[in-house]
Amino acid sequence: MFRIPLVSALSFVASGWCGGGAMAQSEPIPMEVLRRPNVVVVLRHANAPGVGDPKSLRLGDCTTQRNLDERGRRQAARLGEGFRAAGVRPTHIYSSAWCRCQDTARLMNLGPLQVQPLLNSFFDADPAARADQIQKLSRLIDGLDPRGGPYLMVTHQVVISALTGHGADSGGGVAIELPSAGNPRRTHILPATGLE
């Protein structure tokens, strides 16, 4: 059973980021870090059984996509509960256009979301298209105001892996600390939580 010690479960482990971040301390970092205005949480959507999407995928039609199951819907709601209990209030919430990502963001109930195509899955895309999208996403993150967050981005495992070199289970991801006060950009692994 999931309880609000999610706050402690949502502490995360620091590691280097292949996108240019420096190595950080290796012990768990308190949830309060996610409240900082220079933090970008890049979260994989909640539980959606399967891999990829049907060949008939159409972004405007959720019936053609792999979607959250009941466990995933509960997981997303619990993730939001944990964020709120810890006082994490994202100022901007961005989501992939895929229904499972938008549903995760909506069920977290942390505020309105904006679809950001740079967070879209490129599961079947060619390497050049992947590289171009990740380069643009990295520039978008670099351009965020380190005094204007925290920020939340809901996306896919393939995007998180290409962006950071780290995999992500459903409901997990990474937290990126944008440079502030002369500190280098750092990335921390955010373990998956919220499933029973």
Image: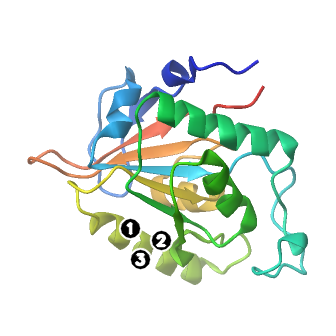
Q: Which residue is mark 2?
A: 134
- Amino acid type, label 2: Ile
Q: Decide: marks 2, 3 in contact (CB < 8 A)? A: yes
- The correct choice, above or below, for 48 with respect to 36 in the image is below
Q: Nearer the viewer, residue 48 or 63?
A: 63
Q: Which residue is mark 3?
A: 136
Q: Nearer the viewer, residue 134 or 41?
A: 41
- The correct choice, above or below, for 109 with respect to 131 in the image is above
Helix, strand or loop at mark 3: helix
Q: Position of residue 119 (x, y in %)?
A: 55, 68
Which of the 4 image quadrants contains residue 157?
bottom right
Left or right of 13: which side holds 141?
left
Residue 138 image label: 1
Q: Nearer the viewer, residue 96 or 112?
A: 112
Q: Residues within 10 Å of mark 3 (few under 14, many from 20)?
A: few
Q: Residue at x 41, y 38 (%)?
A: 88
Left or right of 177: which side holds 95?
right
- The correct choice, above or below, for 80 with respect to 138 in the image is above
Q: Residues within 10 Å of mark 1 (few under 14, many from 20)?
A: some
Q: Residue at x 26, y 52 (%)?
A: 178
Which of the 4 image quadrants contains residue 25?
top left
Q: Decide: marks 3, 1 in contact (CB < 8 A)? A: yes
In whole angstroms, how far apart are the C-alphas of marks 2 and 1?
6 Å
In whole angstroms, how far apart are the C-alphas of marks 2 and 3?
5 Å
